[in-house]
Image (spheres, grey):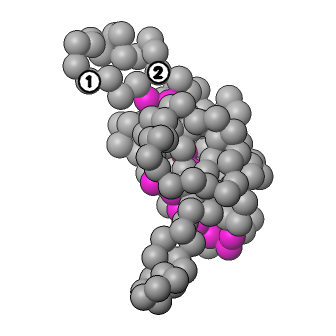
Amino acid sequence: MWGPVSESAPKFPIHNGSNPHGSVMAFKIQPDGDSYKPSLQPAWISADFNLPDPVVIANGVVFALSTGENAQQTGSTDEKRMQSARPAVLYALDARSGKVLYQSGSAITSWVHFSGLAVSMFLMARFMPWTTIRKFTVLV
């Protein structure tokens, strides 16, 4: 989710820190108490992710990318947007709790846009147009 969580959002039983710029949220599918129809129940919410991309999940690990992008599109030049962007960070989160298992730290030196994550066997890759494809070998 981009930006802070709304005050009217459902409450999450597990919080992993403040998240003013964005977050990853996990939900459980459970039967509704009255109708027994499937419903989404909040499970956990991550700490701060600066404009996260969609996640991929493999073997109980949630791979998530904090893009570092500045999303302000109006009244801003590309130069100003670049100045307030931050480097992207790749995370591996425990799927049950949202706790950080791994983060790339400063390994990625720029923000990303129109990127995505993919998992295949023992390889997790971050794809970015117009730049070099970065690969991270992760044993899952």
Considering only vertical position in the picture, is 108 above or below 73? below
Q: Which mark is residue 73?
A: 1
- To which quarter of the image does residue 139 belong? bottom right
Q: Is residue 68 magenta?
A: yes
| Residue type marked 1 | Gln
Where residue 128 sits: x, y (%)? 42, 43
Residue 104 as seen in the image, left or right of residue 82: right
Picture residue at 67% right of the left edge, 64% below the top: 95
> Closest to the observer: 29 or 13?
13
Q: Residue furthest front?
A: 34
> Closest to the observer: 103 or 134?
103
Picture residue at 64% right of the left edge, 35% below the top: 18
Q: Quadrant of the C terminus?
A: bottom right
Q: Is residue 106 magenta?
A: no
| Residue type marked 2 | Ala
> Does any portion of residue 133 appear in the rendered image?
no
Residue 60 as seen in the image, left or right of residue 125: right
Where residue 49 sits: x, y (%)? 56, 38
Of label 2 and label 1, which has the lower sequence position?
A: 1
Residue beneath disc 2? 85
Q: Residue furthest bottom?
A: 36
Element carrying mark 2: loop
Element carrying mark 1: loop
- To which quarter of the image does residue 37 belong? bottom left
Considering only vertical position in the picture, is 6 above or below 61? above
**Circle 1 crowding by C-alpha within 10 Å: few under 14, some 14–19, many from 20:** few
Depth check, mark 2 against mark 1: the one in front is 1
Q: Which residues are magenta?
A: 54-69
Q: Residue furthest left?
A: 74
> Closest to the observer: 125 or 9?
9
Where residue 93 sits: x, y (%)? 69, 55
